Image (cartoon, rainbow, N blue to C red):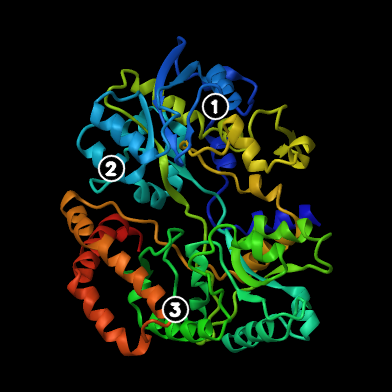
């Protein structure tokens, strides 16, 4: 059952052609054992790397994955980033201001594009064209991904971490509560309301108290996910509160008329107790607490991790069943999901101007786009964490049955870290349980994911406008979300003032520079 579901999901994934097939066609030989194919340097070469990421990790030569890569490529990296820092942005800025640049630098797209134009990082397109056939083939097959990563000058200053697959999150509902109350899985806004109302008033957990929390969330992105029922969007991308594309035009979802309608209805639902009263403050442990105490009824969250509660709570809550459901239809009859993976991430690595071996470095980068390099970046070291079964990398039983999550095991050895490489969706499918797989298959068959906005690269002048206005505008939007939902102000009576305030704060100017950048970056692809 699991294997079939995995095949169905992989076969129907709409992201891009498998890089494994792509790289196989590019390689001079298909024999992975011929290690000489991966040599990036004729002589042993050591390069320094400064890569502090996610506020707690540093790229290290001690990882088994990196040690194997050094053996294959003849290039060894030596970490120079301080592991004592607890802020990756600060660690990057300190390196930049010191002027002491490592050969390889890890960081975020905006920083690469800014400091690349100022001369701190090398433009990579020519190096890729001449010395990195696997990266070149990948971007030729997916030009939109190159456009998404490039700077405002059209040049590529970093190799991004690219995610595979499309699905990330979906709707979950307490199926056992539905059955107990004689209800069906909700399909419309009216039915969602009826279900949440029943969860609130009919004591589905059976403890004689009115303590159920019908809708809950553990993160900002899903706090107001119910707004989708009124054709409003939380975000246009995987980044919470991002701009969205409407028929080729960039606008912000929280300035649209549908958003007004949604917030007005959600304020009423909150008043009736259908939405967690601590929705803005309960935090990342909301799912664990509310499900673990048999209180939570519905949420929107990641398929693999949310599905595991069906196993972990099976012995403590009789009949516990928290199952994925399709996105309910909207008031217009549409059915959509706008939570998805960010394909071209902001994370990755580049080559600093201080690097005296750019050719060898880009060849080293290219290794991670080969079939073997991609396997190692995703699955670890063959024979240790995975083996090849029927031609595909497959986690060992020891990895899959370990008490530590698979992704945590991989981080410790240097796999699934945000170097420039392409994720393999099957890495995640292999440790997803049947319930998660069934949910993802349901969403794949639905084909209801909204297209995502992959971001833009702003010129210095455009960035000045954006930085001048947008941070305060976004803060104001978020403050009004809370104000409206908590009932401190009425949505309908204050909407016109909200719109006027956005314009006064420079919303129109921000849209102008964003649209100009969008057309410059993606115009040929529209």
Mark 3 to mark 2 CA distance (whole Å): 40 Å
Element type at mark 2: helix
Q: Residues within 10 Å of mark 3 (few under 14, many from 20)?
A: some
For the C terminus, the image quarter is bottom left
Mark 1 to mark 2 CA distance (whole Å): 33 Å
Q: Tags 3 and 1 in contact by the CB under 8 Å rule?
A: no
The one of 108 and 369 positioned closer to us in this rendering: 108
Picture residue at 26% right of the left edge, 80% below the top: 499
The one of 506 and 73 positioned closer to us in this rendering: 506
Picture residue at 53% right of the left edge, 84% below the top: 269
Q: Earlier in the sequence, mark 3 or mark 1?
A: 1
Q: Is residue 480 visible?
A: yes
Using the image, determine if residue 137 lies above or below residue 67.
below
For the N terminus, the image quarter is bottom right
Mark 3 to mark 1 CA distance (whole Å): 63 Å
The one of 193 and 373 positioned closer to us in this rendering: 193
Q: Tags 3 and 2 in contact by the CB under 8 Å rule?
A: no
Give the quarter of the image for residue 31: top right
- List the residue tagged with mark 2: 113
- List the residue tagged with mark 3: 486
Return the x and y of residue 390 as percentages of the image width and height.
76, 39
Picture residue at 72% right of the left edge, 38% below the top: 395
- List the residue tagged with mark 1: 28
Mark in front: 1 vs 2: 2
Q: Tags 1 and 2 in contact by the CB under 8 Å rule?
A: no
């Amino acid at each position: 059952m699991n294997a079939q579901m995995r095949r169905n999901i992989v076969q129907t994934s709409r992201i891009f052609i498998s890089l494994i097939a792509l790289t196989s066609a590019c390689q001079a030989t298909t024999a992975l054992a011929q290690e000489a194919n991966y040599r990036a340097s004729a002589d042993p070469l050591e390069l320094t790397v400064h890569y502090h990421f996610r506020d707690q990790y540093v790229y290290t030569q001690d990882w088994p994955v990196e040690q194997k890569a050094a053996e294959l490529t003849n290039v060894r990296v030596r970490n120079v980033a301080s592991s004592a820092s607890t802020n990756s942005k600060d660690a990057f800025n300190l390196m930049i201001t010191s002027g002491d640049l490592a050969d390889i630098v890890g960081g975020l797209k905006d920083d690469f594009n800014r400091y690349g134009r100022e001369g701190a990082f090398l433009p990579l397109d020519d190096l890729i064209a001449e010395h990195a056939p696997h990266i070149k083939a990948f971007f030729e097959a997916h030009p939109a991904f190159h456009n998404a990563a490039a700077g405002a000058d059209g040049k590529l200053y970093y190799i991004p971490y690219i995610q595979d697959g499309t699905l990330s999150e979906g709707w979950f509902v307490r199926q056992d509560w539905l059955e107990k109350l004689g209800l069906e899985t909700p399909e419309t806004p009216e039915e969602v309301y009826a279900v949440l109302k029943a969860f609130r008033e009919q004591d589905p957990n059976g403890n004689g108290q009115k303590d159920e929390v019908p809708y809950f969330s553990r993160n900002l992105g899903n706090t107001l996910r119910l707004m989708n029922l009124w054709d409003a969007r939380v975000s246009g991308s995987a980044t919470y509160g991002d701009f969205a594309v409407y028929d080729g035009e960039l606008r912000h979802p929280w300035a649209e008329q549908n958003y007004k309608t949604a917030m007005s209805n959600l304020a009423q639902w909150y008043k009736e107790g259908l939405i967690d009263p601590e929705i803005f403050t309960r935090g990342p442990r909301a799912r664990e607490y509310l499900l673990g105490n048999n209180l939570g009824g519905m949420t929107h969250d990641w398929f693999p991790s949310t599905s595991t509660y069906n196993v972990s709570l099976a012995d403590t809550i009789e009949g516990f069943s928290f199952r994925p459901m399709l996105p309910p239809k909207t008031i217009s009859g549409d059915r959509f999901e706008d939570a998805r993976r960010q394909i071209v991430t902001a994370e990755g690595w580049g080559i600093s101007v201080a690097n005296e071996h750019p050719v060898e470095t880009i060849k080293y980068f290219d290794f991670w786009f080969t079939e073997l390099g991609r396997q190692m970046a995703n699955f670890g070291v063959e024979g240790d964490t995975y083996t090849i079964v029927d031609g595909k990398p497959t986690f060992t039983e020891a990895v899959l049955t370990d008490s530590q999550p698979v992704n945590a095991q991989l981080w410790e050895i240097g796999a699934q870290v945000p170097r420039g490489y392409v994720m393999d969706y099957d890495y995640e499918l292999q440790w997803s349980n049947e319930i998660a797989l069934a949910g993802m298959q349901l969403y794949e068959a639905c084909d209801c994911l909204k297209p995502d906005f992959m971001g833009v690269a702003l010129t210095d002048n455009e960035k000045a406008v954006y930085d001048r206005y947008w941070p305060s505008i976004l803060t104001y939007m978020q403050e009004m979300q809370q104000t409206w939902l908590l009932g401190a102000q009425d949505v309908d009576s204050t909407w016109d003032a909200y719109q006027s305030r956005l314009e006064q704060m420079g919303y129109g100017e921000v849209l102008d520079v964003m649209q100009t950048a969008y057309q410059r970056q993606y115009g040929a692809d529209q």
